[in-house]
Image (cartoon, grey):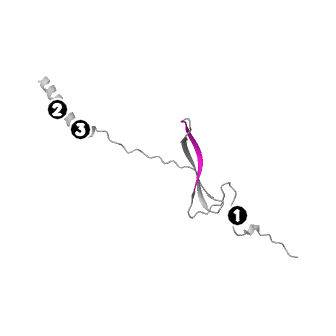
Amino acid sequence: MTYLKAILLAGFAATLSLAAAPEVRAADLEVTRTKSARVVHSHRVRVVRDYDGTAVVERMVRRGHRAPDGALVVTSQIEMTPAVRAQPHRYPNGQPVLPSRLRRSAIVVTPRY
């Protein structure tokens, strides 16, 4: 009698475990592309005034080209693109932009006697 109970318990356990497992279909076995995460790197960007008065965005760009021997040569270059509605206070060399009108501190008052 105990042998029959053990077989019945094993049979019920097998059917329950098979029912709990999901069915595998042929469509599930094909390779699917997963969406890869995109990483955004922020690079240093400066807004400066060009020497003709135009506001420009200055950023470093790495460009690569092949040398005659086939080696990859990577150079860093500065890319300047026009900026809209910007009022930068410095030139690309770091010097401040002087205002078009005189500042109050620049006006020298001489006392009269």
Q: Which mark is residue 26?
A: 3
- Up the image or down, 79 lies above or below 66; here it is below
**Can you tell which quarter of the image residue 7 is in?**
top left
Q: Is residue 30 visible?
A: yes
Mark in the foreground, 3 or 2? 3
Q: Any magenta on residue 34? A: no
| Residue 43 drawn at (x, y percent) | 55, 49
- First in residue order: circle 1 vs circle 3: 3
What residue is shown at x 12% (from left), y 25% (from top)? 4
Q: Amino acid at mark 3?
A: Ala
Q: Amino acid at mark 2?
A: Phe
Q: Are marks 1 and 3 in contact (CB under 8 Å)?
A: no
Q: Are marks 3 and 2 in contact (CB under 8 Å)?
A: no
Q: Between marks 3 and 2, how big is the CA–CA gap?
A: 28 Å
State the extent of the magenta-drawn residues as a range: 70-80
Q: Amino acid at mark 1?
A: Leu
- First in residue order: circle 1 vs circle 2: 2
Tag count: 3
Residue beneath disc 1: 98
**Tag 3 secondary structure:** helix
What residue is shown at x 59% (from left), y 45% (from top)? 76
Residue beneath disc 2: 12
Q: Between marks 1 and 3, how big is the CA–CA gap?
A: 73 Å
